[in-house]
Image (cartoon, rainbow, N blue to C red):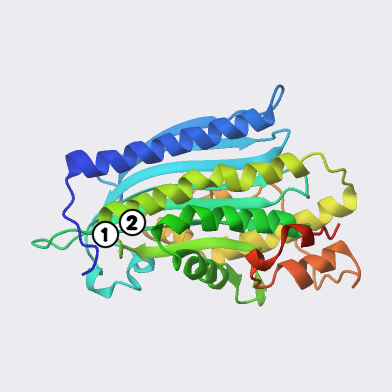
Amino acid sequence: MAGTQTLNPADTVARVRGYLVGLQARITGALETVEGEGGAHFLADAWSKPPGEALQGDGITKIMEGGRVFERAGCGFSHVRGPQLPPSATQHRPELAGAPFEAMGVSLVFHPRNPYVPTVHMNVRMIAADHPGQAPTCWFGGGMDLTPYYGFEEDAVHFHRTCRDALVPFGDDKYPRFKQWCDEYFYLKHRSEQRGVGGVFYDDFSELGFEQSLAMTQSVGDAFLKAYLPIVEKRQGTPYGERERDFQLYRRGRYVEFNLVWDRGTHFGLQSGGRTESILLSMPPLVAWSYQRSDAADSAEAALLQRFLVRRDWLSEGPGAAQSTA
């Protein structure tokens, strides 16, 4: 199988783990800087799963709630081992059904307070599995995507351009492939809606061999703050009222629906016996649903569906053409 790698647990696993723990620390530190004086701080909740549980391993869940800028922000690191891969992880690798596995990754979702600041998700991970007597098979997954409540074309262009730049060193085909994959994955089939303006997403990836596949995943993780923080800094002071807040809570409902109904990461964690509190750190603190809501055709709320929650080639937008719908 392409990308098969015999892992040295004393070297390779420790190296990947060290990168992921460092990435979590860099990102949470940057968010605390954005919160500033008087803002919230992350609570670090270190956990472990001892022998006898469905999974063994450990992790650090970092959670910020009630912040000045971020109403809820969760960023988790986990490193777990289990006796058999859950169905969500083997649908593309049936030959590994029932194989013991080891998985580690960083996953985050940030829910800002201001409706003009988008929600964001990022994940980078490595999974290794093997049947007894066979060499381990290792693959990577990851990506990031942006979910605005009020759309700004310049923000979508910046986010996608940063994603593209992170992937260029690994082949010109990677951004177009992973952008399309993201559009197809973060899609609410039961609503016929995109979750947001997309970004990049990939899974079951090993085609560059271990070292380059790892380097690509690190490049994606390292690009996250460059992709997201400029948008936060630009929008966090935008005035808003009850109308914008109500719309934000309504659209957060779509986020919850996707994560519970369609997200493979959520399913993997729950099916494998993962830590429920950490798995569900992506949930927003407040959310609302409305029966058959309808917004005025010329409103910024309607423009979100018409112009932003559709599949677009964002990099064809010239810098001078970027306009706000608000």
321 w.r.t. 24: above or below: below
Horizontal and vertical percent for residue 42? 57, 31
Circle 1: residue type: Gly
Q: Residue at x 63, y 77 (%)?
A: 190
Point 31% across, 43% down: residue: 16
Q: Secondary structure at mark 1?
A: helix
Whether residues under marks 1 and 2 lie with C-beta atoms below 8 angstroms apart, the answer is yes
Place residue 238 in its image quadrant: top right
Whether residue 50 is visible here, answered yes or no, is no
What x and y, as percent, mark residue 285? 67, 46
Q: Which residue is mark 2?
A: 213
Q: Secondary structure at mark 2?
A: helix
Q: Residue furthest top?
A: 37
Residue marked by disc 1: 209
Left or right? Give the position of 33 relative to 48: right
The answer, for residue 35, to whether it is visible in the render is yes
Position of the N terminus, as image quadrant, is bottom left
Distance between mark 1 and mark 2 Cα atoms:
6 Å
Relative to the observer, which residue lies in front, 175 or 321?
321
Given residues 248 and 9, the one toward you in this image is 9
Q: Is residue 242 above or below residue 48?
A: below
Q: Position of residue 275 (x, y in %)?
A: 42, 47
Residue 303, percent from left and from top: 82, 67
Q: Residue furthest left?
A: 133
Horizontal side, residue 241 vs residue 203: left or right: right
Quarter occupied by the C terminus:
bottom right
| Residue at 45%, 68% in the rendered image | 173
Disc 2 marks which amino acid? Answer: Ser
